Amino acid sequence: MGWIPLYFAHRALALVGPRVAAPFERLRAREATEQMRDTDFFDLLEHIDRESPDGRAVPMRVGASMRCDDYGAFGLAFKSALELGGSYRRVERYGRVVTSASNFRLVEGGETSLLSVIPGLPDRPGLRLTNELALSAALALSREVGRRPFDPIAVHLTLAAPRDPAPFREHFACPLHFDAEEDALEVTNDQLRAPNRLGDASISRFFDLHLDRALDDLPVPDSLVPRIRAEISTALSEGVPTLDTISRRLAMSGRTLQRRLAEEDIRYQDIVSEARRGLAKRLLRASDCSLAEVAFLTGFADQSSFGRAFKRWFGRTPRAYRRAPGP
């Protein structure tokens, strides 16, 4: 079960009328610094979306209202990073200190990059509305810390376009792509390199140490190994990911991930091998990818290396496996 700070619920309730807020009025009596179950927050956002005339825009407006100081040490780490890319890498690494839901990964490309929300479970409208809140907040913080005006070059949202997209256009101030494959801010790499107004290397290191300790104290979900395997499978086309790369995607420190695996007597390399084997079998059975493409997608440098590894794993060549019936 995941969690979300209650102050997000307080801000959402403040934006709707008494009739809409009534079923969740009990939340107002709790301290904003407490945590609530993520599924209860999803219930709240789905209720607001159904019952309030502008309900779809409420999570986006909550995000737009956020400032660095609202996030405590995490917000201070965001604004003390030397450049925006450093801020985003801290979002990727330390987001789980704030909430277990709607965490981010930074996917850097040749000319543009994506600050992308990591897909979560259960996949329901409330989670996707929470993702929109998170993207809106990321944009608000980006504008707060920069030395010059900031607008992303595009915003990608997995939900369908709302009845009235005007509030979204006003806040994001860039092209909006609804029904997208992922929830993400798209920015130029020049924007990532833009210096922050209050960037300070020594202060940034101080908060990094503080947040590393906070990550170490967080509970790790029971589904850790399946999540590691899924992240490895996603990353394999870029080569076999290191443990540190996967730990960042899981919003925890490498040291924490190593310790958690050691506690379960599981080796990271064994999970990598399992992920490669499983992905190779799925691609050979359920896709039209060529053997060379399957080799690339499972992290091998060439088809011959993939073929030798596959025969070692399963006792037959990839071509023979693809032609044979059965699982």
Image (spheres, rainbow, N blue to C red):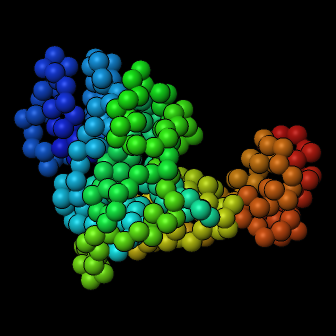
* Whole-percent x, y for residue 96 in the image: 34, 57
Q: In terms of depth relative to the viewer, which is nearer, 286 or 72?
A: 72
On the question of residue 197 being in view, the answer is yes
Q: Residue at x 88, y 47 (%)?
A: 322
On the question of residue 1 being in view, the answer is no
Q: Quadrant of residue 107?
A: bottom right
Total tally of numbered discs in the picture: 0
The image shows residue 241, relative to residue 113, as above or below, that is below
* In-image side of 212 versus 240 (left or right): left
Q: Quadrant of residue 216?
A: bottom left
Q: Quadrant of the C terminus?
A: top right
Q: Quadrant of the N terminus?
A: top left
The image shows residue 160, relative to residue 87, as above or below, that is above
Q: In terms of depth relative to the viewer, which is nearer, 80 or 216?
A: 80
Q: Residue at x 45, y 51 (%)?
A: 152
* Whole-percent x, y for residue 221 in the image: 39, 52
Q: Residue at x 53, y 37 (%)?
A: 177
